[in-house]
Image (cartoon, rainbow, N blue to C red):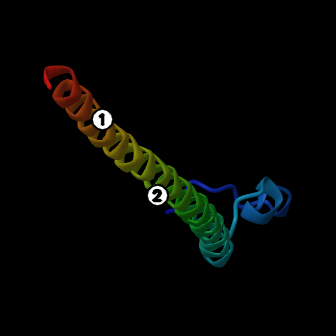
Amino acid sequence: MSNLPTSTADSPFDLGIPTELESYQHQCLMLLDELHEAWADIRRLKGDTRTLVAMNDALMAEVIALKRAVIQLALIEAKHAETRTI
């Protein structure tokens, strides 16, 4: 037997107890909200990834330029060392 009251004033509908269908509909809406949040997170993270890749590319270009500058300075120092010994 059910513990729910039998009077019409206290029926499950009056007490605000959702039907099984309403419960499933509500669960579907909550899942859709979570799905939309997940897709928004994915879009944001893709943008963050693009930003990080661009930053990495810029830093790598700077590292390459600095390595070239070090090599050029080493060559210049080597030339000056040769001219001093002559």
- State the residue at coordinates (56%, 55%): 51
Residue beneath disc 2? 53
Residue beneath disc 1? 76
Q: Residue furthest top?
A: 84
| Between 82 and 23, the one nearer to me in the picture | 82
User: Which of the two discs, 1 and 2, sits closer to the camera?
Assistant: 1
Identify the disc placed on residue 39: none
Cα distance between the residues tagged 1 and 2: 35 Å
Q: Residue furthest bottom?
A: 21
- The amino acid at mark 1 is Ile
| Between 81 and 2, the one nearer to me in the picture | 81
Is 82 drawn above or below residue 40 in the view shown? above
Is 65 drawn above or below residue 33 in the view shown? above
Is 32 drawn above or below residue 16 in the view shown? below
Q: Is residue 70 left or right of residue 35?
A: left
Question: In which quarter of the view is residue 81 placed?
Answer: top left
- The amino acid at mark 2 is Val
| Between 6 and 82, the one nearer to me in the picture | 82
